[in-house]
Structures are given as C-alpha cells and as structure tokens.
Image (cartoon, helix red, strand yellow):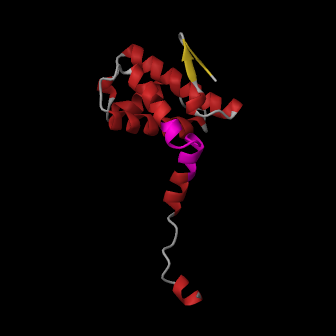
Amino acid sequence: MGFFDFFKKKPDPIQEMRDKMFNQMFPKGDKDILAATNQLLTILNHSIPLNEVKAIITKSYIICLLASEKDKFDKERLKLHLSGYCIQYFDEKQLDEFYNYIMAINSARIFSRRTPSEVTKQGDTYLW
C-alpha cells in the first residue's frame, strides 16, 4: 500500500484554504449561496445574470472576510474591489445597500453564528 501512496495526488494547500474559507462563509452550502445571490439580485433589480451576481457576492464576501481581519473593510474598500470588474452595475444607493448586506451577513456570522440564509431584510434593516 505504501508504494501506491507515492502516486497519490498531494492536497493543494491553496485549494484547502479556499474550501475552508468557503465553508466558513457559506456553511449551508447552496442554500446560503442562493440566499446571498438572491439578495444581491434584488439590490441590483435583477439587472444582471445570476452567475455574474453569484461571482460578485462570493468575491466581495471573501474580500470582506480578509479585510475585516485587519479592521480595514469599509464602503470604500468594497468600492475599490468592485471597480476592478463590476462597479458599472451599481449606483450609489445600491452600493450602500450591498455594503450594508455584506456587513449584516458578516456580523451575523461573527456574533450569532448565523448564515446568509438566516439573514432577512425587514424594511431597511437586516435581521438574523
């Protein structure tokens, strides 16, 4: 058996880190991803394709997690991130709302161990 372990593919540390972060962001998997994607679709008035919205929410949430560890995530940091590939989809009000949503799902995760599928919007407020 030991000889065949030599040919076994070694784990990719970057992929392992990515998987760990993804599981931290979306512990309920597709249910959380769909909830976050749908919320961003609503913010953007369903004006762009679902797959693009999914990419925006996952990339932006990763930036939020990474920058939050250094206490450097704010609306300007989000805007800088989005300017690299999709800022044209957001007006100022939508950008504010997206920032508030990302902060809500991150706060729900940190303080209450809640996931994006457990964060709901009532009026202008996100609750969990």
Image position of 7 (left or right of 47): right
* Closer to us: 60 or 39: 39
Q: Position of residue 61 (x, y in %)?
A: 50, 36
Picture layout, residue 27 above or below residue 100: below
Res 74 visible? no
Secondary structure predominantly adopted by residues drawn in magenta: helix
Which one is nearer the viewer's eye here, 86 or 23?
Answer: 23
* Residue 32 magenta: yes
In magenta, the rendered stretch is 20-33
In the rendering, at what x and y percent does residue 60 appear? 45, 35
The answer, for residue 108, to whether it is visible in the render is yes
Q: Residue at x 34, y 34 (%)?
A: 50
Q: Residue at x 55, y 82 (%)?
A: 5
**As drawn, 46 above or below 115:** above
Where does the C terminus fall, quadrant-wise?
A: top right
The quarter of the picture where the N terminus appears is: bottom right
Q: Quadrant of residue 3?
A: bottom right
Depicted 87 relative to depicted 26: above or below: above
Residue lying furthest right: 112
Q: Is residue 94 left or right of residue 16?
A: left
Image quadrant assignment for residue 81: top left
Across and down, in percent, residue 9 comes to 48, 74
The x, y position of residue 82, in whole percent, is 38, 31
At 45% across and 29% down in the image, what residue appears? Answer: 78
Residue 44 appears left or right of 64: left
Q: Nearer the viewer, residue 104 or 74?
A: 104
Q: Does the magenta segment cover residue 10?
A: no
